[in-house]
Image (cartoon, grey):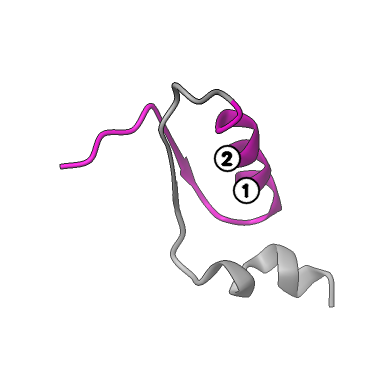
């Protein structure tokens, strides 16, 4: 079983930004979990 230091639920704009920020530290393992494919996020739909 994989182990992560940070697990982010949601791959919208805020979730992906948080993942980028957390991954700046090479000692932190980051996972992003989304119920939809990232390009189908509500953030993308809101932009039109």
Residue 37: image x %, image y %?
Answer: 51, 72
- Callout 2: helix, strand or loop? helix
For disc 1, the marked residue is 16
Cβ–Cβ below 8 Å for labels 1 and 2?
yes
Q: Is residue 20 magenta?
A: yes
For disc 2, the marked residue is 19
- Callout 1: helix, strand or loop? helix
- Which one is nearer the viewer's eye here, 8 or 4? 4
Q: Residue furthest bottom?
A: 48
Within-10-Å neighbours for mark 1: few <14, some 14–19, many 20+: some
Q: Residue at x 55, y 33 (%)?
A: 23
The quarter of the picture where residue 35 lies is bottom left
Q: Residue at x 84, y 70 (%)?
A: 47
- Which one is nearer the viewer's eye here, 40 or 24? 24
Quarter of the image for the C terminus: give it.
bottom right
Please indicate whether residue 13 sits to the left or right of residue 36 in the image.
Answer: right
Please indicate whether residue 7 sits to the left or right of residue 14 in the image.
Answer: left
- Which one is nearer the viewer's eye here, 1 or 7? 1
Q: Which residues are magenta?
A: 1-24
Q: Residue at x 70, y 52 (%)?
A: 13
The quarter of the picture where residue 46 lies is bottom right
Q: Residue at x 64, y 56 (%)?
A: 12
Within-10-Å neighbours for mark 2: few <14, some 14–19, many 20+: many
Q: Which numbered dot is residue 3?
A: none
């Amino acid at each position: 079983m994989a182990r992560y230091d940070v697990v982010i639920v949601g791959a919208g704009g805020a979730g992906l930004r948080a993942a980028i920020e957390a991954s700046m530290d090479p000692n932190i393992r980051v996972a992003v979990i989304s119920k939809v494919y990232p390009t189908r996020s509500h953030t993308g739909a809101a932009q039109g």
